[in-house]
Amino acid sequence: MLRKYVSSSVLLVIATIAALIIANSPWGDLYRSFWELPVSLSLGDFNIYSHGGRAMTLGEFINDYLMAIFFLSVGLEIKREILCGELSSMKKALAPIIGACGGMIIPVVVFFLICPKDPAMERGMAIPMATDIAFSLGCLSIFSKRCPVSLKVFLAALAVADDLGGIIVIAIRYTEHLNLWYLLASAGIVAVLCIGNWRGVRTKAFYFNTGFLLWFCMLGSGVHATIAGVVLAFCVPANIPKGTKYYIERIRHQLEHFPSTVVTYTDRNKPVVLSDEEIALLKSVESASDHLISPLQDLEDILKMSVNYHIIPLFAFANAGVNLEGMNLMSLFSGVGLAVFLGLVIGKFCGVLSFSWLGIKLGFIQMPENANWKSFASICMLCGIGFTVSMFMASLSYPSAEHADFLNDAKLGILCGTITSAILGCLMLNHFLPKEIKD
């Protein structure tokens, strides 16, 4: 889990820089109008991709549909961590959960204290709650073996717990008008998914197709459609069926009968043509292997590449294009921009550090192994890197054109807060971590 985000964080940085450059270039108007293009899939007069009775825009499709796939991936990871990972026991989970609670509560308090008492502005209180797991672990990877594994695990688990808190906030905070019929249909589909799990249905097509129906009903219900991804994730089976010994023996048997001549080819430029019998043997091994991997891990592995290398960079490219025309850095010294900036840089750092300190002093949790307060504080500073989910919450907080200035200010606060937290965190880590690499 620690390595898979590192290279994707590079793509995030590239996508963000590209969006900022293009949005403030002569092609800026074309960039912004591109995300307003309609996206629809219709059957007669029935528009499947609809948003308030009209066709979705490309930007809405990315934020409401593709991000649902992102949250499906996040949900699968959260479920795996709860079942058998860093959140699987109270002893393991307590430290990152306590830290995450502080990292969500204090930034909201900072935003509330800093932001003018304007109901429209205060819609963005949840924006600085998030920690971007890809960016933060990407920064941490710079220090390689200098950083204790326990601190890497703490940061990753805290970001996962943070995501869970963000999902709950999205479900509650950004649900306004509920459609009872769509909500009942969503509940019925969830019941079908639960029955499928209980009956041992392992077919990925069942969960994908039923999940799409759930997403569509969630979209019409008023609950944000991305929640469908999380609900679907928690309905996917995490166990493997009985009789695994049979499939293991089958794989061994098939491999023993696989022609050795195929393995001895040395000329890689020469094409290898397998016989029908050899292809059938490989298909049989593949089919048996599917029974030895839980649907949860299988789906998580399938989605990992698309989410990390396509969906998240595309989301960043679509949402990070802050229009700097008529804007100056003074936006960071007032209103939404300042509240988001301080919420990330000060709120996240103080929240995670203070709650963790209190938990350690009261004896509820222990300091991560081979770490001290200085290196731990450096990790707390990296928690202020809140890009992807913060941008997503900003788009939910200020969705209408009349709040476009607030959205721009929030995005500027997110970008500057993320960069500041990353730089300060890296400088602190470089100063406080051991200079020598220990094996």
Image (cartoon, rainbow, N blue to C red):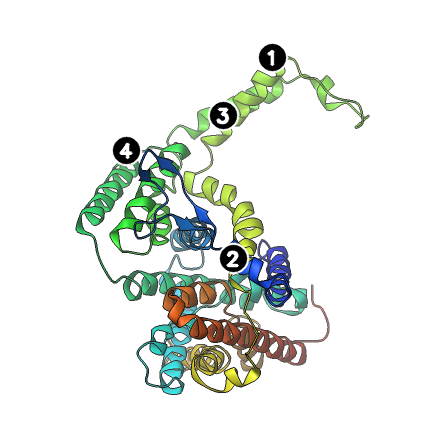
Q: What's the amino acid at mark 2? A: Ser
Q: Which residue is mark 4?
A: 199
Residue type, label 4: Arg
Q: Secondary structure at mark 3?
A: helix
Left or right: residue 405 versus residue 198 is: right
Number of numbered discs visible in the structure rendering: 4
Please name which of the two marks, 3 or 2, marks the residue nearer to the observer. 2
Residue in the picture at 34% in, 49% down? 54
Per the model, the C-alpha gap separating discs 2 and 4 is 48 Å
Q: Which residue is mark 1?
A: 277
Foreground: 71 or 51?
Answer: 51
Q: CA distance from mark 2 to mark 1?
A: 54 Å
* Between 14 and 293, the one nearer to me in the picture: 14
Q: Position of residue 391 (x, y in %)?
A: 47, 65
Look at the numbered discs 4 and 3 and tell me whether their residues touch, using CB distance below 8 Å: no
Q: Which mark is residue 287?
A: 3
Q: Are marks 2 and 4 in contact (CB under 8 Å)?
A: no
Residue at x-position 21% and y-position 56%: 178
First reached walking from the N terminus: tag 4 or tag 1: 4
Q: Is residue 35 above or below residue 110?
A: above
Q: Mark 2 or mark 3, which is nearer the start of the sequence?
A: 2
**Circle nearer the N terminus (4, 3):** 4
**Residue 33: image tag:** 2
Q: Quadrant of residue 224?
A: bottom left
Helix, strand or loop at mark 4: loop
Q: Which mark is residue 428?
A: none
